[in-house]
C-alpha cells in the first residue's frame, strides 16, 4: 500500500462510525482498491487473537478426548463387524443309528484306501521252499527187504563157528537150521508192554508210540523197525511190516494221534 493512502485509511474508524460496514467497504474499494483496503485492515484493524495457557490446555484435552472417542468407536465397530466367538456347544449323545452310519462310513473309507493301494508283489518262485515228497514204500520193496533180512540171517547162521566137541551131524544140522538172530539192542525210552490179546485199536495205541520212540532215539534206521516190533511184541513179520508201511505212508497223521507231542498234552 502506498504512503498516500495511509492518512485516508487512518480515518476509517470515524468513517465506520457514521456508515455501515458494507457501505464503508464499498466506498474504500472504489477509492483505494480492494487489495489496498484488505491489506490495511489486516495490518491495523484486526488484532491477532492470543490464547492463554489455560485455553491451550483445554484445547489439548479436547483433542485427546476426541482421539480417544474415535479410537473406542473404531474398536466397537470392529467388534460388531467381527463374528462373535461362539461358545462350544455340548455335543448331543449320538443314537445307535448314527453310530452305525459313522462306522459304515469309516469302513467304506478304509476299503476304498485298500482298493486304491497297490497290490503287494508276489514272492518270487525261487524264494519258495521246496516241498520234499515223502518216500513211500511199495509192497514189492517191503518184500525185497524181507527177503534180504532172511538171506542175511541164513548167511550169518551158516558162518557161525561150530564147537570142536560137536559131531559133524550137529554141524550139518546147524547149517540146515538157521540159528536165531541175536536180540536187537533196546531203544531208549520207557518199556512198552506187549499187547496180550488186545484189540486192534489198543495194539495200535502201543505199537505206533513205540515206533515214534524208536525214531526219536536216532539209534537205528527206521527200515529196521519191523525187526524191533517182532522182537518186542512177539508179532508176525508180515504184521510188523504192515505196521511199518502204514507208519511210513501216514507219518504226520499218526504222529498227531500217537506221537510224543500228543502223548504229553
Image: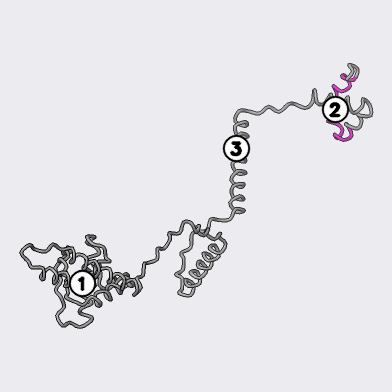
In the image, 262 versus 4, the foreground residue is: 262
Q: What residue is rendered at 13% in x and 72% in y?
A: 173
Labels 2 and 3 touching (C-beta < 8 A): no
What distance separates the C-alpha of mark 2 from that of mark 3? 37 Å
Q: Main secondary structure of the magenta part?
A: helix
Q: In the picture, which quadrant includes the C terminus?
A: bottom left
Q: Tell which circle, 1 or 2, labels the residue nearer the N-terminal end.
A: 2
Left or right side of 143 for 172:
left
The nearer-to-camera label among 2 and 3 is 3
Labels 3 and 1 touching (C-beta < 8 A): no
Q: What residue is rendered at 86% in x and 31% in y?
A: 18
Residue 164 percent coordinates (x, y)? 7, 62
Residue 206 percent coordinates (x, y)? 20, 74
The residue labelled by disc 3 is 64
What distance separates the C-alpha of mark 1 from that of mark 2? 151 Å
| SS at mark 3 in the image | helix
Q: Residues within 10 Å of mark 2 (few under 14, many from 20)?
A: some
Q: What residue is rendered at 31% in x and 71% in y?
A: 144
Left or right side of 19 for 141:
left
The nearer-to-camera label among 3 and 1 is 1
The residue labelled by disc 2 is 38
Please, which colouring scheme is shown?
one colour
| Farthest-out residue, front | 168
Q: What residue is rendered at 85% in x and 21% in y?
A: 10
**Location of residue 31 by image quarter:** top right
Q: Tell which circle, 2 or 3, labels the residue nearer the N-terminal end.
A: 2
Amino acid at each position: 500500500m502506498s504512503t498516500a493512502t495511509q492518512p485516508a485509511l487512518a480515518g476509517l474508524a470515524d468513517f465506520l462510525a457514521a456508515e455501515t460496514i458494507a457501505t464503508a467497504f464499498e466506498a474504500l474499494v472504489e477509492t483505494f482498491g480492494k487489495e489496498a483496503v484488505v491489506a490495511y485492515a489486516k495490518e491495523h484493524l484486526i488484532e491477532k487473537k492470543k490464547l492463554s495457557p489455560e485455553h491451550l490446555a483445554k484445547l489439548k484435552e479436547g483433542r485427546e478426548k476426541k482421539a480417544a472417542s474415535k479410537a473406542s468407536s473404531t474398536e466397537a465397530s470392529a467388534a460388531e463387524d467381527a463374528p462373535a466367538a461362539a461358545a462350544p456347544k455340548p455335543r448331543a449323545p449320538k443314537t445307535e443309528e448314527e453310530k452305525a452310519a459313522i462306522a459304515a462310513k469309516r469302513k467304506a473309507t478304509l476299503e476304498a484306501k485298500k482298493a486304491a493301494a497297490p497290490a503287494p508283489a508276489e514272492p518270487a518262485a525261487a524264494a519258495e521252499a521246496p516241498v520234499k515228497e515223502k518216500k513211500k514204500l511199495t509192497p514189492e520193496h517191503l518184500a525185497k527187504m524181507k527177503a534180504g533180512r532172511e538171506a542175511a540171517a541164513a548167511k550169518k547162521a551158516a558162518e557161525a563157528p561150530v564147537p570142536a566137541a560137536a559131531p559133524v551131524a550137529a554141524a550139518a544140522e546147524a547149517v540146515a537150521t538157521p540159528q536165531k538172530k541175536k536180540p536187537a539192542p533196546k531203544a531208549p525210552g520207557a518199556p512198552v508192554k506187549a499187547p496180550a490179546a488186545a484189540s486192534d485199536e489198543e495194539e495200535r495205541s502201543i505199537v505206533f508210540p513205540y515206533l515214534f520212540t524208536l525214531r526219536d532215539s536216532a539209534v537205528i534206521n527206521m527200515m529196521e523197525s519191523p525187526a524191533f516190533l517182532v522182537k518186542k511184541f512177539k508179532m508176525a513179520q508180515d504184521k510188523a511190516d504192515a505196521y511199518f508201511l502204514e507208519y511210513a505212508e501216514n507219518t504226520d497223521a499218526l504222529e498227531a494221534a500217537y506221537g510224543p507231542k500228543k502223548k504229553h498234552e
